[in-house]
Amino acid sequence: MIGILGLSGSLRAGSYNTALLRNAAELVPAGARVEQASIRGIPLYDGDDELRGEIPPAVQALKDRIVANQALLIVTPEYNNSMPGVAKNAIDWLSRPSSDIARVFRDRVVGIIGASPGARGSALAQVAWLPVLRTLGTRPWFGGTLYVANAGKAFDAAGRLVDEGDRDRLRRYLEGFVEYITQMETLR
């Protein structure tokens, strides 16, 4: 079974991206699973805490969950044409101490999807993540994209994608992503 840790980059209770992550867990192909995770509980990064060896328990638990899976799926909102600060803060903590980068991120397959109320979905946020992922030594999947635009209309009250076209695009994205993970696993 291929394990994918899906990480919602939003703290909002009614987050479109958390809803998109739930849909991904439902639509992932057979032979794979999406384990849902949140950045809730991760404090603002403070280098003094790190120097004292005080890695927050929420950070350590999330690191362990990433390591227990073959891939990471970042489900990102877009704030002011870029990645959300709370999500970047979480990744910054997850890369500390720097000796953990290899264990948590190096050669880890990463996919990025997202939803936004805007007309472009989360396209600019997804692009903004690429330098961060390159710095961490991940293996991003570039074989597909998924930008859910006009998110306020894309989900019903229960958080289900209402448009079959969006559901089909998510399904196809996940199929390609799982195929890429499988290919990368054979190279290890």
Image (cartoon, rainbow, N blue to C red):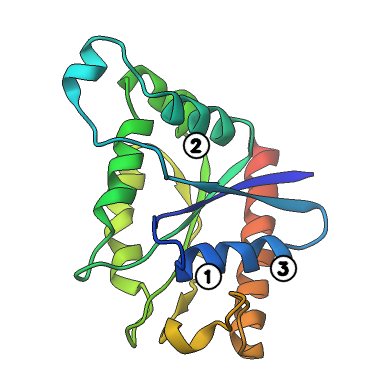
Question: Residue at the top extreme?
Answer: 52
Which residue has dot 2 on it? Answer: 107
Q: Quadrant of residue 188?
A: top right
Mark 1, other Cα within 10 Å: few <14 / some 14–19 / many ≥20: some
Residue 56 in the image: state x and y as whole percent.
Answer: 37, 24
Q: Dot 2: what SS?
A: loop
Image position of 145 (left or right of 50): right
| Amino acid type indicated by mark 3 | Leu
Q: Secondary structure at mark 3?
A: helix
Sequence-wise, which precedes: disc 3 or disc 1?
3
Please state the horizontal and vertical placement of residue 18, each as a whole percent of the image: 51, 62
**Does 180 sit above or below residue 45?**
below
User: In the displayed structure, would residue 112 be above or below residue 170?
Assistant: above
Q: Residue at 52% across / 39% down in the picture? A: 108
Instruction: Name the disc covering residue 2, or none.
Output: none
Q: CA distance from mark 3 to mark 1?
A: 16 Å
Helix, strand or loop at label 1? It is loop
**Dot 2, how many residues are within 10 Å of its Cα: few (below 14), some (14-19), or many (20+)?**
some
Residue identifier under label 1: 144
Q: CA distance from mark 2 to mark 1?
A: 19 Å
- Please report the residue visible at 48 percent of the width from the left and 24 percent of the height from the top: 103
- Asked where in the image residue 43 lies, by quadrant, the reply is top left
Q: Position of residue 161 (x, y in %)?
A: 60, 81
Q: Which residue is mark 3?
A: 27
Residue type, label 1: Gly
Residue 50, quarter of the rendered image: top left
| Three-letter amino acid code of the residue under disc 2 | Asp
The tag earlier along the polypeptide, 2 or 1, is: 2
Q: CA distance from mark 2 to mark 3?
A: 25 Å
Question: Within 10 angstroms of label 3, few (less than 14), some, or many (20 or more) residues?
Answer: some
Q: Which mark's residue is nearer the viewer, 2 or 3?
A: 3
